[in-house]
Image (cartoon, grey):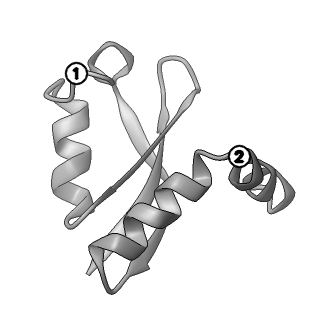
Amino acid sequence: MFCTYILKSIKDGKFYYGHCANLETRLSQHNSGKVRSTKSRVPFIIHYKEEFESKSEACRRELFFKSIEGYKWLRENKII
């Protein structure tokens, strides 16, 4: 199983979008400062997640979340 996730920074309240195979491990990497793009914004909490059968499905969903249409969908569904 793979998942697409949205993390929320406790420090600045902003969101980070990603996909992975093991969300708990990935969250640990983010919170320990091992991810260059998020190390200045730790700590993070899991704000939202969706699970998928394949990595390609999870990647497509992440790209959707990062698009204008995805942003609108997330706002309409009161996720962000």
* Amino acid type, mark 1: Arg
- Nearest the eye: 53 or 80: 53
Residue 61 numbered mark, or none? none
Quadrant showing the N terminus: bottom left
| Numbered disc 2: secondary structure | loop
Instruction: Count residues near mark 1 (Cα–Cα under 10 Å), then give few for <14, some for 14-19, many for 20+.
Output: few
Which residue does the image show at 39% across and 35% down from the upper left? 44
Q: Residue furthest top?
A: 40
Residue 36 numbered mark, or none? 1
Query: Residue 80, relative to residue 5: is it above or below?
Result: above
- Determine whether, in the image, residue 18 is placed left or right of residue 69: left
- Nearest the eye: 30 or 58: 58
Locate residue 31, reporting x and y percent: 24, 32
Locate residue 37, reporting x and y percent: 31, 23
User: Count the marks: how many?
Assistant: 2
Which residue does the image show at 32% across and 12% down from the upper left? 40
**Mark closest to the chain's N terminus, 1 or 2:** 1
Residue 80 numbered mark, or none? 2
Query: Residue 37, relative to residue 23: is it above or below?
Result: above
Closer to the observer: label 1 or label 2? 1
Q: Residue furthest right?
A: 76
Locate residue 48, reporting x and y percent: 53, 58
Quarter of the rendering containing residue 14? top right
Query: Residue 27, relative to residue 21: is it above or below?
Result: above
* Amino acid type, mark 2: Ile
| Numbered disc 1: secondary structure | loop
Instruction: Count residues near mark 2 (Cα–Cα under 10 Å), then give few for <14, some for 14-19, many for 20+.
Output: some
Locate residue 33, reporting x and y percent: 18, 24
Which residue does the image show at 47% across and 18% down from the upper left? 11
